[in-house]
Amino acid sequence: MRIDVYIPLFLPLLLTAAAAQVGRRVSPAPAARVLTVAAVLTAAASTWALLLLAATLVNEAPLVATETGETGRRLPEPVPVAIAVAAITLLWLIAFRLVRALRAHYATRRVLERLCEGHPADSELVVAASSTARAFAIPGTPGRILVTSAMLGALEPAERRVLLAHERAHLTHRHSALSTAVTLAAAANPVLEPVRATVAFLVERWADEEAARSVGDRRTTARALARAALVTQRARPGCALNFSEHAVTRRIAALQTAPPPNLWSIGVAVLALAALSALGALDATGDLLRLLGESLPD
């Protein structure tokens, strides 16, 4: 356990370093999926590793200390007490960050759902009268596309089709679930924040590619994105996905070239890295249980 328990704490650094390369070299759809799964696995493994480090303080519990003292046996200390105390502190911080992220997610979703009130339940498109240009994909059953009148007025008919195809792609491929999962992973392990940012960019690129394929014109898609970027302001982050957010210049440039290849070999390598983190946590768990089993009285 002395080494294995620390592996999940350091491997997220490698995933963060690899995320940018994956985002540039791999097609957005597989890249977003792979990075999200890898982020969730590594965040879970690192959190579990902290729990294992905190669990080594079990020998300080009064009941355990009394029992081991009576039998003359002493529980081993696989890690220094200071590290175990630091792990407990980090676990409290993780809990706080997760609660805050969930509150922000549901607060944003409630605001957007209130904007859709009064519209037929089966209507996919909701147009809100507003002087601020916005377009969102709101997940749900059914999912909805919320567009302001200012956004529609700023776009030409062909560009409106691009916008709707883009937001529909978010709903069809459940991009909100990916965004939420990687956001929670980054909340549990702040080292993964660059991975979260990369996935946020990739789901927008993914929707851009779907929109370009739907309308059959990459140039019109790029023009619609550029025009929307000129009239919109930065939206509030949350569960919704905004058409003109996330590195618009890079997205427009990407639409000027052919889509990148899938390159699943890179995706497999990233998943293997995440699996290694999970295996490290699993091995450390077995080591701790074995130590406790050997030291506790029968």
Image (cartoon, helix red, strand yellow):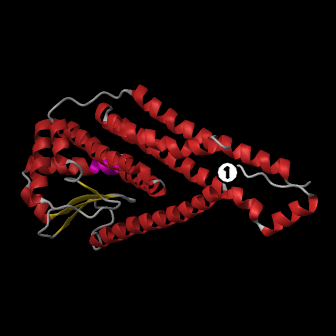
Most common SS among magenta residues: helix
The residue drawn where x is 37% and y is 26% is 263
> Which quarter of the rendered picture does the C terminus lie within?
bottom right
Q: Is residue 152 above or below residue 34?
A: below
Q: Nearer the viewer, residue 68 or 237?
A: 68
Left or right: where 103 falls relative to 41: left
The secondary element bearing badge 1 is classed as: loop
Classify residue 232 by image quadrant: bottom left
Q: Position of residue 167 (x, y in %)?
A: 26, 51
Q: Is residue 171 magenta?
A: yes
Q: Residue at x 91, y 57 (%)?
A: 72
Q: What residue sits 25% from the left and 59% below the top? A: 136
71 vs 146, left or right, is right
Amino acid on which the number 1 mark rests in the picture: Val
Residue at coordinates 27% horizontally, 71% vertically from top-left? 115
Judging by the rendered image, the residue that carries numbered circle 1 is: 79
